[in-house]
Each structure stands twice: as C-alpha cells, then as structure tokens.
Amino acid sequence: MSREIFWMIVGMGLVTYVPRMLPLVVFQNINLPPFWQNVLKNVPFATLGALIVPAVFFIQEDMMFGVIGAATAFIAAYIGANVIVVVMSSIVVLCLYSIVF
C-alpha cells in the first residue's frame, strides 16, 4: 500500500470520526430541555423518511411493493420502534410479500 493511500484512509477516518465524537465530548454534561430531547430523538426517523418516501413513488415494476414497505416502516416508527427495528420490519414484510405473491 502506498503512503498516499494510507494517509487518505487515515484522513477519511478522522473526517468521519471527529463529527461523531465532538458532540459526545462537548455536550456530555449538558442537560437539554425535554422539547429538544424529543426533537433529537426523531431526527433518525425524519432522515429515514426523507430517504425512503421519494423512492416509494418511483418504483416502476410493482407500486404495491413500495407502498407496503413504506406502510410497514411508518407503522413500526409510529409505535416507537428503534430505527433498526423499523428497517428490519419493513424488510421482513417485503420478503414475505415477495414469497406469497
């Protein structure tokens, strides 16, 4: 491995690690008001929705496939499941749908 590639990998690692580490270090002793805690809890779901919703409407072959997946994700998120559970529940339902139909 050449030196340039090594330092590029190290640089990319730092660029992805530092923005994730800084909020933990800087804000570890700060207690946010409940309103802001609730806002920050919903950021992953909002991001997931922004990524998934446009894709649902652009599925060419089977429109129901996207609608069923999105509905499953919406229901799991509404119940209050973790983001990983939301994604996995949608995957499981779509796998079952593809087997049955």
Image (spheres, rainbow, N blue to C red):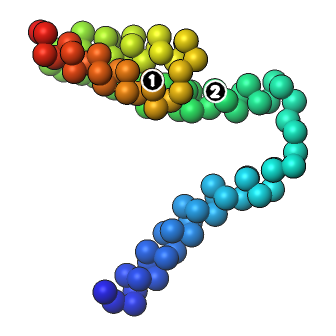
Give, as a three-letter code, the residue at label 1.
Answer: Val
Task: State the residue position of label 2.
Answer: 42
Q: What's the residue at 31%, 25% (across, down)? A: 91
Mark yes or no: residue 57 visible.
no
Q: CA distance from mark 1 to mark 2?
A: 13 Å
Nearer to the camera, 58 or 15: 15
Give residue 76's position: percent from left, percent from top: 47, 15
Residue type at the position of mark 2: Asn
Q: Position of residue 9 (x, y in %)?
A: 43, 74
Vertical position of residue 34 compared to residue 15: above or below: above
Place of residue 7 in the rendered image (x, y in percent of width and height, measured from the top left): 46, 82
Image quarter where the C terminus lies is: top left
Asked which quadrant contains residue 38, the reply is top right
28 displayed left or right of 11: right
Q: Determine which residue is flagged by label 1.
A: 86
Q: Is residue 43 left or right of residue 98?
A: right
- Mark identifier at residue 26: none
Residue 46 occupies quadrant: top right
The local secondary structure at tag 1 comes to helix
